[in-house]
Amino acid sequence: MTLIVNGEKKEFADGMTIQEILKALGVEEKVMAAAVNTKIVKKEEWEKFVPKEGDKVEFLTFVGGG
């Protein structure tokens, strides 16, 4: 399936969950929030939530600073 991840078109196997996508991208430890089509997906739902073809997925990290 094709998804738009943080503004870039990427290909993933059909049926992959948010958690599996994060792992495939190698960022599972860094991401603090996920949104699909501008709707927040709670972290406890990542293992079950499967985006659909063409969805826009945003993975957000928090950066400290001052």
Image (spheres, grey):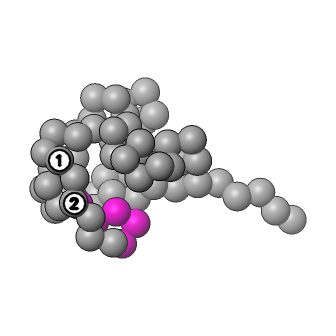
Q: Which residue is mark 1?
A: 13
Q: Is residue 18 visible?
A: yes
Q: Which amino acid, mark 1?
A: Ala
Q: Are marks 1 and 2 in contact (CB under 8 Å)?
A: no
Residue 29 vertical position relative to residue 12 in the rendered view, above or below: above
Drawn side of residue 12 relative to residue 30, left or right: left
Residue 7, horizontal then vertical, whole percent: 36, 72
Q: Nearer the viewer, residue 43 or 31?
A: 31
Q: Position of residue 38 (x, y in %)?
A: 34, 58
Total residue callouts: 2
Q: Residue at left 17%, top 61%?
A: 2
Element assignment for label 2: strand
**Residue span colored magenta:** 3-7
The residue that appears at 58% across and 47% down in the rendered structure is: 30
Residue 2 or residue 34, whichever sits in front: 2
Q: Tell me the residue at 22%/53% (across/down).
A: 12
Residues packed near mark 2 inside 10 Å, few (<14), some (14 to 19) or many (20 plus): some
SS at badge 1: loop
Examine the rendering and report whether any part of residue 32 can be seen.
Answer: no
Distance from the alpha carbon under mark 1 to that under mark 2: 7 Å
